[in-house]
Image: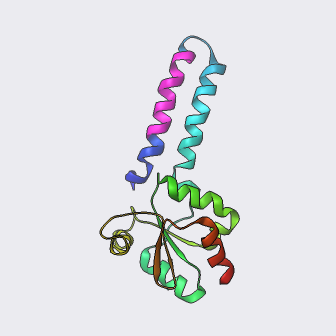
Amino acid sequence: MMRVWMLPLLLVLGGAAVASGPALDGNGGAAALFLVPFVGLAAVNSPLVFPKSPGAAEAQRRSAADGRPVVYWRPGCTYCLRLRFRLGRSARRLHWVDIWSDPEAAAVVRAANDGNETVPTVVVDGRPHTNPDPAWVRGQLSAT
């Protein structure tokens, strides 16, 4: 569990370190200007941006029942963030599975990507698609 929070924690600590200089000089406004972007980056790279991740087996069961795609992702992945943000509100309709919190999910991704944990890997109708275009994923959602 700590692994998924490592990048956000490092970003907050880095921002605090950068902001400490102006803060020690008595310039609280400049310190805040340095700290706020780091905290924003930490929030975007945290698991809070993505919905609670079901296990791979549960996501596959839900996908079979409702026909919606399963997205395998990991915290800190810029391509996963890009997909999440470009999908907007429709991203909530997908089943998001964190491969760092579920070894079975990581195995599914490795099987689909020649042994690599390349994410996002989107599974539609049992077929994996690695780092697909967000417009294509949106089209798959409208088909369900």
Position of the C terminus, as image quadrant, is bottom right
Query: Which residue is more in the foreground, 72 or 16?
Result: 72
Residue 64 part of the magenta-drawn span: no
Residue 134 is situated, as x and y percent measured from the top left of the image, at 61, 65
Residue displayed at 46% across by 31% down: 14
Position of the N terminus, as image quadrant, is bottom left
Residue 127 is situated, as x and y percent measured from the top left of the image, at 46, 82
Query: Which residue is more in the foreground, 144 or 133?
Result: 133
Residue 98 is situated, as x and y percent measured from the top left of the image, at 45, 64
Q: Which residues are magenta?
A: 10-23
Residue displayed at 59% across by 73% down: 94
Left or right: 14 with respect to 137? Answer: left
Query: Which residue is more in the foreground, 34 or 28?
Result: 34
> On screen, 26 above or below 16?
above
Which residue is the extreme one toward the top? 25
Residue displayed at 29% across by 68% down: 115
Residue 19 part of the magenta-drawn span: yes
